[in-house]
Amino acid sequence: MQRQRVTVSLVIAILTVVVTVGQAGPAIPPGTVRVAYLQRILSLDPHGSSGAARITWIVSRHLFNRLVALDPETKKFQPELALRWQNPTPTTWEFELRRGVKFHDGTEFTSAAVKTSIERVIGLRGPLAPLFAPVESVETPDPYRVVIKTRDPMGTLMSNLTILSIVPAGTPMTEIVDRAIGTGPFKFAEFVRDTRVVLDANPNYWRQGAPKLQRLIFVDIPEISARATALETGEIDMAVGLPPEEIKRLRQNPALKVDIGQTTLTRIMWINPRPGSPLNNLQVRRALSHAININAITASLVAGIATPATSSIATNVLCYAKMKPNAYSTTLARKMLAEAGYPNGFDTSLKWTESNPKEREIADAITGQFALLGVRVQNTQQAFAIWLDDLLKLNWDLELVSTGGGTGDPDFTLRRLYHSRAKRTLYTSAEIDRLTDEAAATIDLDKRCALYRKAQEILWDDVAAIYLFDQLEAYAYRTRIQGFKAPATEIFDLSDVSVSP
């Protein structure tokens, strides 16, 4: 009887140990890193409707390669799939391609893949399509040479190519939902919508020594507190996009590190000036710009992960020009509204999705500050897919969004979003169209920057949006991750990261 009690006690003790160990986090294969980002992954197609979403760029950076890359510090272009290039005429660009590169399915990378990729991004008419609108033809005189001809001189082509993912020749015009095939350091393994994307190391990657990981998993945990908790318990290894209070708490954990990196992103409140809407009145838009206490929001809600915006593009984007801030004054804002014919305010709506830290609190703060003017705001949170659909259909009055110069070039923000041809809002300006078109067709950098400065001044004065703050990015990760360094832009790359046992 005594022996039975001892045996039972031993079994219970063993089970207790097993349960306790299990609480430290699920077992994972060696060489695996699990990352949770702040946006849901809707598609793996780098050219389609989600082509400008940050999470699509981040996942694509691991699956695909580009012709060239931009060094964010030197602002110089570096070889990737293209080894050399030249611009023999203002409308002709020639690229010599890297040899011996294979796609994940074993097919060879050639000039035909470049032709397919450029024609596909244009044909799908997604958010990246306007960047390549000036391209007239893509010629493939031999398997390792590409000639891109444009209708007019295109000073932005090299910048735009830094975000063009190269897909296999003949990839159809239908959306790539899964089974994405690239030449990148990782290859597709699994996509479970709203759950995870699993990438395995590409053993035949053309760059020696990369990747150092065996498996990379993007885990879908959009809710902030759940993302932080998953990091602490070991369910994930890295959490990206956390608010100040979570950062402060996680920094106290000896098993974790927290890095803050720069981005090319500016958080803004976009304004849609529909005909007949109060927002179509410049005086109203200016009144609203004085009603938001941006310094207070930056110093409290997003302290440490943002700085007040001083232009329509972020400070580390090429050709940035500082504008004079709009002073916060509820009294002045009320006076301007009354002069515009709205002494009692008006009704409007604000839409947003929880794809950035503190988005709810920021929306609530803006709504409360507008209420002091009598501006009654229907404050609406939407699921990301619904929010994106409404955004593209212009089904909104006010929107909280992040706009970015992901190419490092102001054209990506200023012309792609504010040119009347883009139809991203109902705001139009013939002068913005002229300036951004001329800048995009100018090769000389000093001349381009002079044009972009004028464009930034017009957008600021016209209050095409209310520019809130430039974003910083928080990366919290377990100490088992080795070799990570916060990047100079929001698009991080883990192909050179390793993990300790």
Image: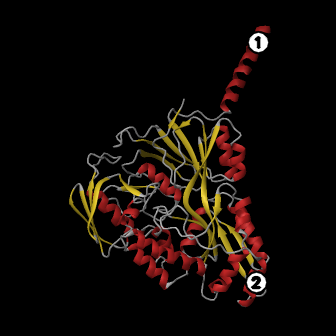
Q: Nearer the viewer, residue 145 or 51?
A: 145
Q: Which mark lies nearer to you, 1 or 2?
A: 2
Circle 1: residue type: Val
Q: Nearer the viewer, residue 242 or 322?
A: 322
Q: Residue at x 42, y 70 (%)?
A: 446
Callout 1: few (<14), some (14-19), or many (20+) C-alpha neighbours within 10 Å? few
Q: Position of residue 40 (x, y in %)?
A: 57, 56
- State the quadrant of the N terminus: top right
Q: Which residue position is annotated with label 1?
A: 6
Q: Is residue 420 visible?
A: no
Residue type (three-letter) at the residue carrying disc 2: Gly
Residue drawn where x is 67% and y is 38% of the image? 233
Mark 1 residue element? helix
Classify the position of the C terminus by image quarter. Answer: top right
In this view, the residue farthest toward the top is 2
Is any part of residue 149 visible from this angle?
yes
Q: Residue at x 71, y 65 (%)?
A: 295
| Residue designated by label 2 | 345
Labels 1 and 2: the sequence-earlier one: 1
